[in-house]
Image (cartoon, rainbow, N blue to C red):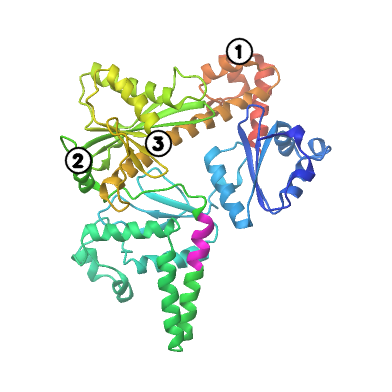
Amino acid sequence: MQHRSDYRISNVDNKPGVYVFRDRLGDVIYVGKAKSLKRRLASYFQPSRGKTADPKLRSLINSIEYFDLFPVRTEEEAMLLESRFIKQYSPRYNVVLRDDKRFLLIKIVLNSPYPRLSLTRLRKDDGALYFGPFPQAGVLRVTVTFLAQYFGLRSCTPKVPGERDYTHCLDHVIRYCSAPCIGKISRQDYGTRIQGLIDVIQGKTDDLVAYLAEKMNGYAGKQNFEMAAKMRDVMDNVKTVFAAQNRTFERATFQSFPGRAGVAELQQVLELAKAPRHLECFDISNIAGTFAVGSMVCFVDGAPSKKDYRHFRIKTVKGIDDFAMMREVVHRRYRRLLDEKRPLPDLIVIDGGRGQLNAAFEILTELGLAQQPVIGLAKKREEIFTVYDSEPTLLERHQASLKLLQAIRDEAHRFALSFHQGLRRNRILNSILDEVPGVGEKRKAEILKTFGSVRNLRKHTAATIAERLPSIGQKLAAEIVAHLRRVDGY
């Protein structure tokens, strides 16, 4: 992160990339992409720019205190990175990627015994897996159609397809579909195909590219150049769609099919006295110690139990100390279960290595729960740590037990991150009041206490604000409303 006063045009690369502007608190206020970072930043930091630009741009420029630069190789990568940052930080000055003109996402619906593949522009919290965004819509559509056919996935819309649906399928659909509706494939085998598809989306394309190259050469040898060209185009599409995208993915794990098989296998590999039907997993999320939060997610019989999820605002830890944060969250969770005489989980999973595990075990011991089964799962090599073994356990990547642990760990991470980002969004919105002359910390706290948030404050007129807060006065209330309208007008 560089201070604005340190900006020198000679120090900026003449490359495509993404720039991130931050205010005096270090919060992200704007994210943009550029074909040339050098030229784009020069256009913002011209001495006269802060006076001659239109009001919305002047407001942005005057708010910039720090900036980050992220050079990339191509404009396409810049588009992807910009989109990811905007969705991650929700900067208040960004509006471009908040409308319906979003990039396409690949969606795999998990609330069905036989998931299907589809495209969407909106990411929802509906239990589905989402991959993307992908900037090249036309290429993506062709590639997704091929992948659905290659893996034999169904394209029909019923949640659980049956024989009646099969009779209505078109001939060209039947030819490519594995037909789970009439029992041609088991649920487990269908799940294996889904996992293969996810592997390809996440960049594991070598086997598929080799298959396409072999088909292309075979058609060319038979002088069927039309089909050879088609295989070549599909192969290029696979590389184009998933190459840059793979660098921006956070790992996602297919969560539906490990299920009970993963539970049974986990009992065996960890040598547990009973099957871990009830799992609870903890994760910590913070950036440089700010807005530190913890999450606890629960899986029952290998599937998420979202009604049992919990968020934790870190209360006792200052600065960066993940171990202390883990101790606080674990203590609060199980102190409460003990006080309320509620059942404990069959297995506790800690996101992290031996340090995080030891921190959790220390608290469990203090609570008289030293015999409670608990493990740590480290991301780098997916190592499983226990408090009794000096060396970690490594499971094969294909094992259902590991997939189950990865699924609950990734869900805990997602849940913690979403809560953390929500807090940051609220902080960004509320910090708008800092820009209003005459509104100090005391008045800001009074305004937020009365109206709850800037989002709610926007709904009221100056007269209403002055009426509910006589200490503000009509003049300052009018200035607050005018400022919020200027910001909204950007």
Q: Secondary structure at mark 1?
A: helix
Exactly how many numbered labels are in the figure?
Answer: 3
Q: CA distance from mark 2 to mark 3?
A: 26 Å
Magenta stretch?
237-245
Counting from the top left corner in percent of width and height, residue 13 is at: 72, 49
The image quadrant of residue 210 is bottom left
Rendering coords of residue 481 (x, y %): 64, 26
| Amino acid type assigned to the residue bearing label 1 in the image | Lys
Describe residue 315's horizontal placement relative to residue 399 as left or right: right
Residue receiving disc 2: 267
Looking at this view, is 270 or 102 the one in front? 270
Q: Which residue is mark 1?
A: 442
Identity, as a three-letter code, of the amino acid under mark 2: Gln
In magenta segment, residue 244: yes
Q: Nearer the viewer, mark 2 or mark 3?
A: 2
Name the residue furthest bottom. Answer: 223
Residue positioned 63% across, 52% down in the render: 72
Residue pointed to by mark 3: 415
- Whichever of labels 3 and 1 marks the residue nearer the N terminus, that label is 3
Amino acid on which the number 3 mark rests in the picture: Phe
Predominant SS of the magenta segment: helix
Sequence-wise, the earlier of marks 2 and 1 is 2
